[in-house]
Amino acid sequence: MSEIGNKLLNSKTHIYVTILLAVTISLMIRIHNLGTVSFFWDETFTWYVSESTDQIIAKISRDVHPPAYFFFVSIWKDLFGISEFSLRFPSVLFSIFTLLSLVHYASAISRSHAVAFTIIISTMFVFSPLDIHLSRFARQYTLIMFLCTCFSYSLFEFAFSGNKRFLIFSFFIALLAIYSHYMALVYVTATIITIILIKPSRSNIIHSLSSYNAGALLHATAEYTLFPVGY
């Protein structure tokens, strides 16, 4: 392909147009009849827990779910009301945010093939049956996908650039992800192990494990404070 053709293929205009089209199609698919079906059991739990912000900790203290998502939904509910559409729409938003973060992640990996990556990732994500289902469900699953994508991007940026701002950002994103759903612990652990295997420098190992241990200590302390043994 000629140099002019390569420049045209990888122009920012093509990337922006592709993203805009992907977001538009994604929104159309995910909000279609979003509020026509009544809440499922798990969604009624979201409604119950987020009904009153000052009661969230008390309500989930006997359950297995962390509080971050429910605090967000409670604030969202106060702003936009309670309905099937309103309570499910945050999942749609986090699905769109995940799409945008994945595209940015891929573009950072290979700027020379940014347009191709944008088209491939957008197509796969927009029409993913799993994401379509989860984004129409009033639960924290798309939030977790978004946070975990941001976490891995930040940690990989730190590993290859050495910029500690990415490490600090990944630390707080990891905590937020874990306090949205405990399964994020698995993803955070796997990502750190991957970083160490791909770029096993002394600095990456020390900083990654130190960040992980600090997060684990903070998580354990907060967990004991919020949900004391014997409640």
Image (tube, rainbow, N blue to C red):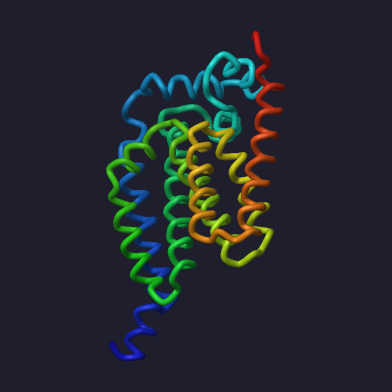
> In the picture provided, is 169 more to the left or to the right than 101?
right
Percent x, y of residue 77: 55, 30
> In the picture provided, is 203 more to the left or to the right than 134?
right
Please state which of residues 146 and 196 is positioned toward the viewer in this rendering.
196
Please state which of residues 117 and 196 is positioned toward the viewer in this rendering.
196
Q: Identify the residue at image location x=63%, y=43%.
A: 212
Q: Identify the residue at image location x=41%, y=22%.
A: 42
Q: How many marks?
A: 0
Percent x, y of residue 80: 54, 35
* Quarter of the view holding residue 89: top left
In the rendered image, which quarter contains the C terminus? top right
Please state which of residues 168 and 44 is positioned toward the viewer in this rendering.
168
> In the picture provided, is 213 more to the left or to the right than 121?
right
Q: Identify the residue at image location x=53%, y=24%.
A: 65
Please state which of residues 163 and 28 is positioned toward the viewer in this rendering.
163
> In the picture provided, is 216 more to the left or to the right than 177?
right
Residue 36 seen in the current view = yes
Percent x, y of residue 98: 45, 50
Asked if residue 4 is positioned above or below residue 54 in the image, the reply reads below
* Quarter of the view holding residue 123: bottom left
Q: Identify the residue at image location x=35%, y=23%.
A: 38
Asked if residue 222 is positioned above or below residue 8 in the image, the reply reads above
Residue 93 seen in the current view = no
Percent x, y of residue 193: 51, 48
In the rendered image, which quarter contains the N terminus? bottom left
Asked if residue 219 is positioned above or below residue 121 in the image, the reply reads above
- Residue ranking furthest to the top: 230
